[in-house]
Amino acid sequence: MAITKILHMKSGSGGFKAKHLARSINYILNPRKTQDGQLIGAVNCQVGKALEQMRVTKELFGKTGGRQGYHIIISFKQDEVTPEVAFEITKRFTEEYLGQNYEAIYSMHDDTDHAHGHIVFNSVRFTDGGKFHYKKGDWAKSIQPITNKLCVEYGISTIDIEALNQDRLERSEESNRFDGRATSYSAMICKDIDGCIMLAPTYDTFIEMISEKGYEVKNAYGEGEYLKIRPPGRTRFRRLASLGENYSEERIRERLVSESLDSYNSSYQSDVEIMKHDYIKRYKRAPMSGLQKKYYAKLYKSGQLKKRTYSQAWKYRVEIEKMQALEKQYHFLVKHDIRSEIELADKVTEIANAKREANTEKSRAYRAERKYHALFGIAHGMMDLELARLEYERGDDFFCKEYTNWCELNAQLKAKGYAFQEVLELEKFHRNQKSLSAARERELFQELRIAKTIMDDLVGENIGIKIGKQKKSIDRDNDGKTAHEKSETLKNSKRGER
């Protein structure tokens, strides 16, 4: 399954209008994300000169302002497709959707758990100078259908566009009312608004209360057409009416009269479900080592995030990321049963060696696959003509030329000692070998990174302990006495003299 998203790039400020376009191109061509540039391609332009050629096209037709380009992302379901197949789908999508009119550059990134393709293309057509215009509904009419069609050809599950649109509509409606379960950002805002409505006796008080929560209010008293708020941490205002029919200014004024905390509590109590408790036998866990307890304690302390309200979650993004990192580190220690710093250092060495072996195996798999590129090219040509061949064999002479081409390609395979299905199976085998080796390398890379972060933390803490000890002993003299000890000795001697 693959879903396609499209973004646009506006004109940059200053003299370099194509700044955002250049940044997007550099990002998708990152060699660390594209197997050292192996998963990169272009249509109607050259990879190394894509930005320059796009700018020349804009200048040629006098359209250097406005939107500079568009960025399409094709995200594939985890473990359903190999990076190579994802790259092939991205390439064919680019050729079909943009190949006739636009300069485009594409790549496939395999640095995350799920492969995803990137396409950046010029906003100006090189054929007639017209600009690309994305209209509402284009995704369902012309963009996602191409992705679905390619997924079918490669044996990948597809997205039901109608069902997805209906699901989005239902989720949008659901997020516009707070029932204790909604977790969308809209529902978080609705929760704050609902709370202020229940407690505020008047509209003026409601505006004051929502402002005290950190929201900036606009058009509260009819200065503009719509009542708007800007949530804390956000840059744009949002019309309250867009949250649902219960959040327009008129409806809020009505709810201020009819709703209160008592009415909310009574309606909430009627919906509370009776919970049943099942008692099961508990087994003791294996005792944790000191190192494991240390990271478990850090996780426990991070649990205070659960006490904070949903509507304030934007404030704690950094802390959430730290908690997730600690969780990964703790799971790593438990998974490998590491109980000391020495065991951790040994495991780092072991994983580093395994990663080098996996990298060697990956290179070996890619070299083995490259030997058959010519055969695979012939087979792909036959696949493109497969439907025409079937129609011709059913009696449709219109596809006579395509059938002849298919037979010529089939004869080339036979001359090399291979059958069509045999080559397809061979390609599938090598594709799986590359995918497995790449997945193994990524897994080891992630583990090595986690292990090194744990070691860095331990080294930092050990340095802190040493510095503390040095501060305590900095005033010691040659006899090993501190300033405090020398002072006590002097006092005792004076008492003796008295």
Image: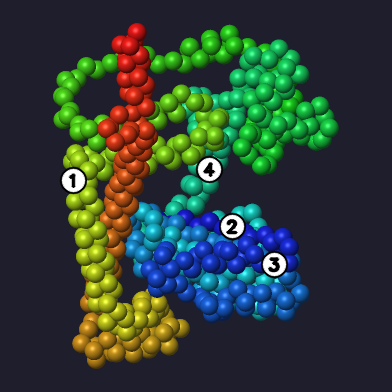
Q: Earlier in the sequence, mark 4 or mark 2?
A: 2
Secondary structure type for disc 3: loop
Between 21 and 296, the one lying in front of the other is 296
- Name the mark nearer the viewer: 4 or 2: 2
Q: Earlier in the sequence, mark 1 or mark 3?
A: 3
Secondary structure type for disc 1: helix
Amino acid of disc 4: Arg
Q: Which residue is mark 4?
A: 168
Q: Residue furthest front?
A: 497
Q: Are marks 1 and 4 in contact (CB under 8 Å)?
A: no
Q: Residues within 10 Å of mark 2 (few under 14, many from 20)?
A: few
- Name the mark nearer the viewer: 3 or 2: 3
Residue 374 in the image: above or below residue 151: below
- Name the mark nearer the viewer: 4 or 3: 3
Left or right of 85 in this view: 178: right
Q: CA distance from mark 1 to mark 2?
A: 48 Å
Q: Which residue is mark 3?
A: 16
Q: Residues within 10 Å of mark 1 (few under 14, many from 20)?
A: few
Left or right of 198 in this view: 467: left
